[in-house]
Amino acid sequence: MNDNKHIIEKYLEDVELQETEHRLTDEEIEDNYVDFIAYYRANLNVFNEDYLGIKLAPFQEFMLDVMDDYDISDIIASRGLSKSFITALRAVDVALLYPNSEVLVTSLTMAQSNLLINEKIKNMFCAVGNMFSSPVLCKLREEKWITFTTDEHTGGVIVKFGNNSFIKAVVCGESTRGSRATYVITDEFMLVKKKDYDEIIEPTLHPRGFLNRPVGYPEQPKQTFLSSARTKQNWGWTHLKNCVKEHYKGHSQGFYVGDIFTAVANGILTPQQYYQRKKNTDDLSFQQEFLNIFLGNNDDSIFRYEDFESNQRLENAFYPRTKEDIMYKVPQKYKFKDEEIRFLVTDIAVVTGDENDNTVILLGKINKRTGQLSVEYIETQNGMNSNQQVILMKRYFYEYKCDYFVIDSRGEHLRPLI
């Protein structure tokens, strides 16, 4: 028994001696921090999986590397390919690994910008109990090292970190002037105006500031552009082509392009979901949104996509006044011109309540000088009787100051309109 006691005491003395001999100094601990941070910065897939506890598919790791390796990156991916998920994770990685980072998430609307932060960062990565929650991020949020607030002036969500980094939602518009950023993420960038991005968002970028920054340190501000495919008329198509060109010239620009088949192959979507979305989407929209194809024109095309796209936007839109507007004599804001011939066209439902037979009213005009045809307003009604149809058409006829009334004459007889 005494021998055993001696052995135990000797073992404890040896352990204490070893702990004393191997105790790291403050300088050694700091060196270890530097080594690990440098390693994690160079290997975000390891950082996300080993530290944050979020495992990614290989194509997602590649998408993340494109954003990380290049100063400017274009991510053109179909719906369902998790581009918002990866970009939100990228924003968190930057905020954690690079103190004093200022990350702006921008888009055409504040709702879209807030969605990326709320849906992915707040309610997924930093929320307990879901598939992609990070134990580390949840703990940091619980300890208030990560906080979520809302800008009282703009309504943009702000994520603040204990190392002075932040992620902030902004709109690609005038309210963002004067902001500062070391990294800008533009969601659905092909919907924003290039002029607004160039004049408002891009000037926010500046190098990251930190204590004892070395002179000539090469770290550059970064930009990531996210979107699905649009038409080749959109400025995003030119932006992507330039990005690819500059990439192969050796400049710091990268790109990733993926379609719905990548999502199916990696188990993010099922084959059944693919077939369902193909069934429920028209051919052109399916090519853009899911096959990631930019729609262009053949040399002998009669109708051009850019013509459709440009004519979808009305500078002087017509909206019929409501009954209340008319009752309280609210003036019509639409600006009528004498050089226009205006008309009302209607296709009338002859069976009241038939879900497959609707009353359609179309308002349009022709410019007498140029001959240009414009459709200003379309309305569809279901379940109307003939009296209701006549009253609505008569109201719109005079509201739009029509010159002509065109009716589907194969329907049943109507009461005189005028």
Image (tube, grey):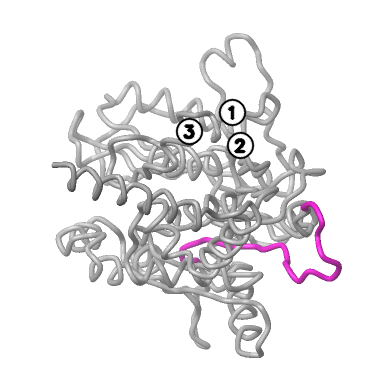
Q: Which residue, given by chain and number where applicable, does mark 3 sit on?
A: 141
Q: Earlier in the sequence, mark 2 or mark 1?
A: 1
Task: Residue type at mark 1: give it.
Answer: Thr
- Going by the numbered disc 2, the residue's amino acid type is Lys
Q: Are marks 2 and 1 in contact (CB under 8 Å)?
A: yes
63 relative to 349, above or below: below
In terms of sequence position, does the residue under pointer 3 or pointer 1 come before the other? 3
Placement of the N terminus among the 4 image quadrants:
top left
Residue furthest to the front in view is: 2
- Residue 117 coordinates in the image, percent (x, y): 50, 42
Labelled disc at residue 149: 1
Above or below, comparing residue 163 to residue 245 in the picture: above
- Can you tell which of label 3 and label 1 is closer to the viewer? 3
Residue carrying label 2: 160
Residue 355 image point, x, y percent: 19, 36
The Cα–Cα distance between marks 3 and 2, rounded to whole angstroms, is 10 Å
Prevailing secondary structure class for the magenta stretch in the rendered image: loop
Closest to the observer: 19 or 104?
19
Q: Is residue 211 magenta?
A: yes
Q: Position of residue 275 (x, y in %)?
A: 18, 63
- Alpha carbon distance from label 3 to label 1: 12 Å
Residue 328 placement, left or right of 298: right
Identify which residue is drawn at 31% across, 67% down. 260
